[in-house]
Image (cartoon, rainbow, N blue to C red):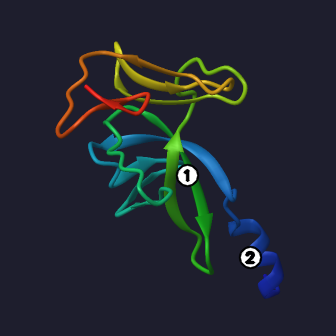
């Protein structure tokens, strides 16, 4: 049977983004249709995160070889519209609220000086 290149490409096309499950701590391997190894972790500048085994993550694929890249955790937390929450485990979080407030849950450690309303504490 003869097929054009276009027909073959259409049959082998993967989704551009999908949810996968981390199979090795650190996010280096993700289960999609099959397990993909050496997956790159792509995050915004200044943001650091190491996915745990079993977490559901968003995987995008780009480039000519559809290289997968983990971009974030799926279904992470209970955020209100406009909020951002940074959390590593249950009971520890920094919540940037939509109205401009900041809520911190967990033990707080400060290295260096602390200034509150322009006064050093």
Residue of label 1: 59
In the image, 23 versus 79, the foreground residue is 79
- Quarter where residue 41 is shown: bottom left
Q: Residue at x 42, y 49 (%)?
A: 30
Q: Residue at x 61, y 21 (%)?
A: 79
Identify the secondary structure beneath mark 2. Answer: helix
Q: Which x, y percent locates residue 49?
A: 36, 45
Is 54 placed left or right of 111 in the picture? right
Distance between the Cα atoms at labels 2 and 1?
21 Å
In the image, 26 versus 24, the foreground residue is 26
Is 86 located above or below residue 22 in the figure?
above
Quarter of the image with the C terminus in it: top left
Residue extending furthest left?
Answer: 111
Is 1 placed left or right of 93 in the picture? right
Is 100 located above or below residue 39 in the figure?
above
Q: Residue at x 46, y 60 (%)?
A: 45
Residue 3, visible in the rendered structure: no
Q: Residues within 10 Å of mark 1 (few under 14, many from 20)?
A: many
- Residue 97: numbered disc: none
Q: Which x, y percent locates residue 56?
A: 48, 34
Identify the secondary structure beneath mark 1. Answer: strand
Is 66 located above or below residue 96 in the figure?
below
Q: Which x, y percent locates residue 67?
A: 52, 69
Q: Which x, y percent locates residue 48?
A: 36, 50
- Residue 9: numbered disc: 2
């Amino acid at each position: 049977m003869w097929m054009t290149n276009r027909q073959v490409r259409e049959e082998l096309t993967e989704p551009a983004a999908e949810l996968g499950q981390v199979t090795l701590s650190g996010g280096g391997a993700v289960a999609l249709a099959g397990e993909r190894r050496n997956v790159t972790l792509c995050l915004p500048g200044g943001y650091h995160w190491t996915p745990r085994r079993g977490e559901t993550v968003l995987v995008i694929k780009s480039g000519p070889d559809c290289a997968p890249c983990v971009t974030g955790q799926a279904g992470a937390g209970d955020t209100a519209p406009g909020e951002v929450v940074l959390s590593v485990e249950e009971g520890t979080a920094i919540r940037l609220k939509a109205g401009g407030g900041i809520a911190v849950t967990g033990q707080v450690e400060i290295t260096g000086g602390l200034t509150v309303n322009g006064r050093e504490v």
